[in-house]
Each structure stands twice: as structure tokens, then as C-alpha cells.
Image: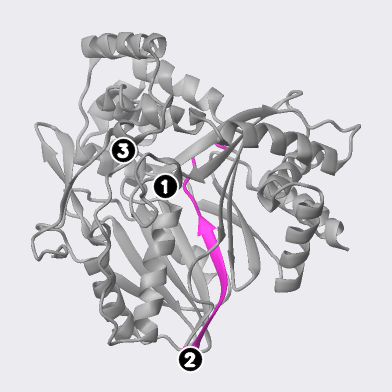
Amino acid sequence: MTISQDNTPYRKEVTRQERRFLFSPTSDISLALRLRGQVSEEDLRSAVDKLLVSYPLFGVRLEWVDNDVHWSTTEGAAEVPVKVYPRESDSTWIEVLNKEHAIPLRPSKGPLTKFVLVKGNDVSELMIYCHHSISDGRSMEFALREVLLHLADPNREPPRFPEAPPMTPEIFPKGAAVGKVRASLIGRFNKNWEKERVLFDEEDLTNLWEAVWKNTEYGLEIIEFSQEETQQLIEISRSEGVTLNSTILVTFVKARHDAIGRDSDKMSVATTVDARKRLAVDCSEAVGFYAGGSFLDFNYREKKSLWDNVRAYHKDVENQLQGPKIFSVGADHFVLDQTLVDAIIIALAGDQVEPHQSRYEKISDFASKTDGLAVSFGERMMSNSPQLMSTNLGKLDIPDEIPSIQVERAFFAPSSAMGMEIVLGVATVNGRLTITLNYYEGYVDGKNIKSVRDRAEEILRGLIE
């Protein structure tokens, strides 16, 4: 059991925004570092244990009260595993990622975090794997930073960070709360749900998890840039008055149009952002879920240059990021009945549960009710999902090198909605930019994603030639 900083079991209330991910078998996120040098398994276990003193949230299980989840706690939680796999090639870590995804989450037992070392003779991948209900991408960065620092100095004392509040409406910036009209609309949905409510539990989740991962794999395409190429992309973006993030996102919009074609004039795009420094309270060192997002319909104008399009997008997204709209999706979940959110996931994927599974009759009957509120909500959610979403962690705040180990590259593999076409994970470490295209086989055509990846790489490399 992980002990908190005052030597008592760690305990924290689960927010409604964190709670919304619980029943999704595809809401796990990963951050992997490619390391050159030898990693001691014993030292890694010790480093992870020390990390959990600084950030006990990574060692929790979830606690049910009155048929719902209210608390995360280290009391009675299973140990955070450190798993080791032999490394066969540069892609072994992706195969391992799929194996770990397919293992059903047991929230009441925990943990909701795993560390995995894909170990080779000279090159290894060190990966942290978390459920989204306790972590975002930045939190995993903090965790890996602490692990590396403990590996660098086995005698280092775990640092103590001040307890930060969770991201709730109480610390949202002004104007981020749900308006009266929208609150009233969501209230009507909640009342309608009361008439047909079905509650789902951990056994239902296990059934769903097993079924979904029997029928899908985590697809991942990668674009890697050298230190020189990364710096060139940063400099040319700056010279055009935009960020590298805007350049990457609009490049993928164009690549999608070129490789697959246009579905309409406008493409729905989203950018997730770290909200820690946008809140009313400083949460800059906090772990947990502190993410917001920008959602735009963007029209790539073929008659204009790529840079004209990047500048148009950059202007729109900067205006949105300066306001409270990035909290709008999260704010909705503080009003919406969370058991309806559970049911939406069941409605979307419940038809995959098989007769031999323990909750087959319950889940399949529910998913087959096409006139139910959860089904209509799910269909609306799928149709409104962005076609392209990007999360850019930027330059990771972790050491590029520690004694006997060099950090060569980072691979960020964020979660995605089942039908979301392209989700970009972007991260830079040791001056090297890496872009991953993340999707779920069985829901999205992997050949199309590879075509988009190839075209995007061609465009980006063309910018710096």
C-alpha cells in the first residue's frame, strides 16, 4: 500500500470529470521513453516506489459507495507493477502496449497505473501506462521525471509537493461554468434518464473490456524527427508567426484531405491543453486530470498556401484558448448524471459482449434498445466527435541524460474515442520531436491512417528542405 506524505493512506474524492472515463475500455494513456544504456530492474522498482511517495495518486484504487464511485484511495490497493518484457525490435513496445491494453482494469482493486520496461541489450523503452480517470499526459511526464531522477541518484529523497485541489468548477476561471440554459437542457436529460436508468458495475466493465479488446487493437503510426529537423521546424514556424503545434495540426488537416479526400468544406479539429496554469489556483505541479480542449470547425482553403492556412487556424485557436471555452466539455460533466455516461459507453460497444460472458444478457439487451436515451446520446457523441484531435506535450521537463542512460525519444500514446479517426500524440525530448497517430483497429481503417501519416511526413519534411 502506498502511504501519503503524512504516513496515512492517501484518499481523494473522484471528480465528475475524472469519473466520466471509468467505463471506457479505451481510456488508457501511455508515455514511453526510448533509453540508450542499461536499466537495472531492481533500481527501477525502487525508483517507482519513491515516486509513489511523492505522487500517491498513481497507486490508488477506486472505492464504490452506494453503487457509485466516490473515492480514490491507496488503502487496500494492489501494488503498482513494474513489468519487464524482452525487446526484439523497435516496435516491440507497441506489441507490449497492446498486451497491456487487453488486460481488464479492476478499479476496485487497482492499481490504475503500470510501469513497463521493454528491455534490450543497449536500447530499452520505459513506459508508464495510466487510466485517464487519474491521469493526463502531463502527469505521466511528472512521473517519469521522478523515476529518472531517482535512477540517477538512488539516495535521493522523494520530494514533497503541496496538495493541489482537483480541477472542479470551484477553481475554474470566470465564465467557465455551465450556463443556465445548458444546465436546464442537461437537467432534462437527467430526468429522462431516471425513467430508464440501468446501473452498471465493475463486472459489467470487465465484460465490456474483454469484448472490446478481443475485437480491436491499438493502432499506432509514428513520425520521428532528428534534433536538427526539430529545430528547423520550430524556427520556420516562428518565422511565419505561428507555433509548431499549429503547423503540425494544419499539416495533418491537409494530409487528410490529400490522402483520403474531403467529407465537407470544414473539418472538425480539437486540441487538448494543459489547464494547470489557467485555473484560479496554482496546480502547476499537480498530478491528476487537468486538461481542457479547443474545438473548432476548420476550413482548409486549397487556393491559399499552407502557411496562410496555418496562420488562419492559429488566430482562431489562440482566441479560443485565451477564453473559458476550453473548460466547456469538462463543465458539462459536473452537471450530467454520471451513470448516463457509463450507459453511453455500454450502448456503443455492448453488442460485442458474447454469450459466454457473465453479463451478456444484461448488456446485450441494453445495447439493443435503439430508442433508449443512452443510444441516442452515444450516436450524437460519435457524430460530433472531432475527425482530428491533437495533444502536444511540448518539450518534456525530464533529464536528457542520467549516469549511464541517455533519453533518446518520447512516444506519447493518448486515448481516443472508438470512432475518432486520428488522434495525434506529440512530444519532444532531447531535442527530438515525435508524432504518433493513434486509433483503434476495427473502428478506423488503418490503411487510411498510414496514408495520412505518409502524406503528413512528406509535407513536414518539405517545409525544411
Earlier-in-chain disc, 3 versus 2: 3
Residue 100 visible in image: no
The quadrant of the image that shows the C terminus is bottom right
The amino acid pointed to by label 1 is Arg
Dot 2 falls on a residue whose secondary structure is loop
Which quadrant would residue 48 be assigned to in this image? bottom left
Residue 88 visible in image: yes
**How much space separates mark 1 and mark 3, taking CA atoms?**
25 Å
Q: How many marks?
A: 3
Mark in the foreground, 1 or 3: 1
For residue 404, which numbered disc appears in the image?
2
| Left or right of 10 in this view: 245 | right
Residue interval drawn in magenta:
403-420
| Left or right of 440 in this view: 6 | left
Q: What x and y, as percent, mark residue 109?
A: 16, 54
Which quadrant would residue 261 be assigned to in this image? top right
Asked whether 291 falls inside the magenta stretch, the response is no
Mark 1 = which residue? 276
Of residues 322 and 348, the one drawn nearer to the viewer in this rendering: 322
- Mark 1–mark 3 contact, CB under 8 Å? no
For residue 23, which numbered disc appears in the image?
3
Give the class, few, some or many, for how many residues have Cα within 10 Å of label 3's Cα (few <14, many ≥20): many
Asked whether 410 falls inside the magenta stretch, the response is yes
Dot 3 falls on a residue whose secondary structure is loop
Earlier-in-chain disc, 1 versus 2: 1
- Mark 3–mark 2 contact, CB under 8 Å? no
